[in-house]
Image (cartoon, helix red, strand yellow):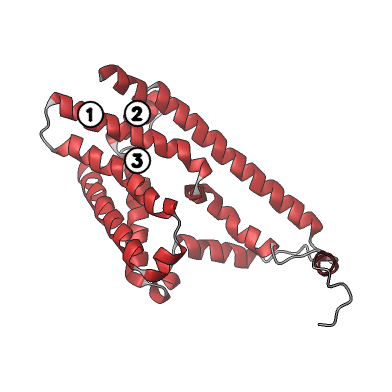
Amino acid sequence: MDSLLEFARGPLFRFSIIIMILGLARLIALDLYSIFRAHQKAGDKSLPWGLIISRSIEWLFPVKRIAHNRPIYSIFSILFHIGLLLVPLFLFAHIQLWEKGIGFSWPALPYNWAYWLTISTIIFAVLLIIGRIFNKSSSFISRKQDFLWPVLLLIPFVTGFVCSHLNLSPSNYRLFMLIHILSGDMIFLLMPFTKIAHCVLMPLSQVICTLAWKFPADTDDKVCTTLNKKGAAV
């Protein structure tokens, strides 16, 4: 068990971080290239940067969306994402692991903050899963991974809390810690290949959405030709 733990928190952790960084960098590069190509082909090349920036800020701080679209569910989602970002990055034990893996560290959260953030993240994750299951509109448009991802994200929080705050026998502690580390490594490995990649692609989303409406001048002719409707009355 000890050798598995060392492998999971050492070589496997570094490998998963490398895959995550390279995978996310690839997605960003592909999106930037797609933006460049779309801008080249666009008939109207002007972009409303003020609108793009304001919409990006609204996405990051969705006050209007909370007020008008399922406010309770939206609040739970935001609070869940806050814990999801802060605890893995700023928990002291995690920072030590990051330092071992990448060679540098940063200040940690105070203990009480980390404690309550972990608990709140677990609670809000469970509430989001329940809300997604029992809300007809959410369950209708959700794919399997939309249910599995919150469960996978919940595992390292629950196991980490158990290891840190419950009295366990040495063998049970090593088992829970192994599950904790392996689930975290799996999240890093899967991140570039699933919808969780939106955590880094979001800043580009509004530019992409805006460019999607900047069709080249001959787009209508090409669409009509593709649909075999060239010259047909509208």
| Residue named by callout 3 | 88
Disc 3 is placed on an element classified as helix
| Residue 55, quarter of the rendered image | bottom right
Whichever of callouts 3 and 2 sits on the residue coming sooner in the sequence is 3
| Residue named by callout 1 | 175
Q: Residues within 10 Å of mark 3 (few under 14, many from 20)?
A: some
- Give x and y (percent) for residue 97: 34, 28
Q: Residues within 10 Å of mark 2 (few under 14, many from 20)?
A: some
| Residue named by callout 2 | 97
Q: Image quadrant for the N terminus?
A: top left
- Give me the C-alpha separation between circle 3 and circle 1: 20 Å
- Give x and y (percent) for residue 54: 55, 66
- Residue 102 appearing in the image: no
Mark 3 vs 2: CB contact within 8 A? no
Whichever of callouts 3 and 1 sits on the residue coming sooner in the sequence is 3
Mark 3 vs 1: CB contact within 8 A? no
Task: Report the side of 210 relative to 108 (left or right).
Answer: right
Task: Report the side of 57 relative to 182 (left or right).
Answer: right
**Nearer to the camera, 13 or 102:** 13
